[in-house]
Amino acid sequence: MQIQVMTNILDRNDQIAAEVHKRLSAAGIFVINLMGSPGCGKTSLLENTIVGLKNEISMAVIEGDLFTTKDAERIEQYGVPVVQINTGGGCHLDANMVSSVLDSLDLEGLDLIVIENVGNLVCPAEFNIGEDVKVTVLSITEGEDKPLKYPLIFKQASVVILNKVDLLPYTNFDMQSAIADITSINPDTVLVQASCLSGIGLPEWYDWLKEQIRMKKTRSI
Amino acid sequence: MHEMAIAQGILDIVLKTAAENQVAKVTGIKLLIGQMTQVEPESLKFGFAALSIGSIADGANIDITIVPLVGQCNSCRQEFSVERYCFLCPNCSSASVTLVSGRELAVDYLEVE
């Protein structure tokens, strides 16, 4: 005998993600799910963003990491509220993990929460965690073939940050090909060429972010 | 290896459905997996087999249908198979394309006794 089910396997996760999103939206907070490979510069982007926008926005960080608190310690030095989620070897954050740490954050007065996902180009792309947008960081040294190898994480991203462009002269990274692949996978994405070391391109990212926060506040009033 | 998390999601759905229908044994599970999901079928089967030991779905055969990646152009309405993950309309080059299929991750039906 057959029983028709037709149920999305990630329904439960998506329900919790929707609850997280609703709670943070009610507080007028814009939420980013920050994804990318280990070492692509997610934490460096966060550090730069904290410093670059410290007089303009109030932000908090949720740090996903397999076992360590290294990234959270880096962020803490900047005086920003940070909560650590250790996945204990799990390759991605899910909505329940994020939901369970929300009470540790004082949401009052926050403009932005960045959730730094586990460094990984595969698994995080499948799981909504309550974010408004996904942002994917790809560093020059990873090679321009990565978008076509891991298309989903680029398809899902509202912004793709091509980081470490200061290293372009020392690599054979084909920028034209990378841009062509990313825009054909995701024609709507905003592409930012940046270097967290030199600071080039970051103002463009800050402007985008401030505009999103402003729009989020307008929507939630 | 997020297949384990997906396998747990499948087991939860299977056990809930079985309980609602007072089923004693689940012998087969039909899954729909989109081409643009990052799920490795063999890992998923392995994960499910490990998680379902001792449950009423222990030993159930997992049958996976891969759903092709298809887009539809919002300008000229052409439906097309998405090749090389290029989401530009092959007919009119429009960048406004809706995903028709290829992102499924669903339990379709159960075979039960």
Image (cartoon, rainbow, N blue to C red):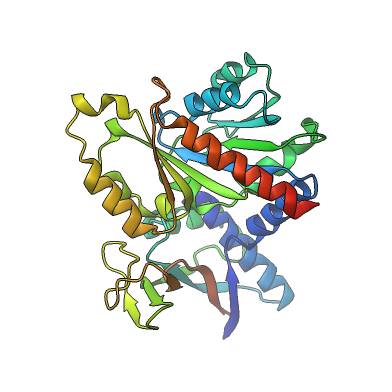
Considering depth in this image, is A47 or B67 the residue closer to the camera? A47
Considering depth in this image, is A8 or A217 the residue closer to the camera? A217
Percent position (x, y) of residue A213?
A: 66, 43
Asked whether, in this view, residue B77 is left or right of residue A72, the answer is: left
In the image, what residue occupies the spot 22% across and 48% down?
A177
Q: Is residue A216 above or below residue A196?
A: below
Asked whether, in this view, residue B2 is left or right of residue A5, the answer is: left
Looking at the rendered image, the quarter that the C terminus of chain B falls into is bottom right
Q: Is residue A42 above or below residue B6?
A: above
Percent position (x, y) of residue A167?
A: 27, 25
In the image, what residue occupies the spot 50% across and 26% down?
A43
Q: How many marks?
A: 0
Tell me where residue A105 sits by quadrant.
top right
- Can the viewer see residue A130 in this picture? yes
- Can the viewer see residue B53 in this picture? no
Residue projecting furthest to the top: A77
Considering depth in this image, is A27 or A118 the residue closer to the camera? A27
Asked whether, in this view, residue A74 is left or right of residue A103, the answer is: left
Asked whether, in this view, residue A149 is left or right of residue B27, the answer is: left
Tell me where residue A111 sits by quadrant.
top right
In the image, what residue occupies the spot 31% across and 62% down?
B85
Percent position (x, y) of residue A127?
A: 55, 51
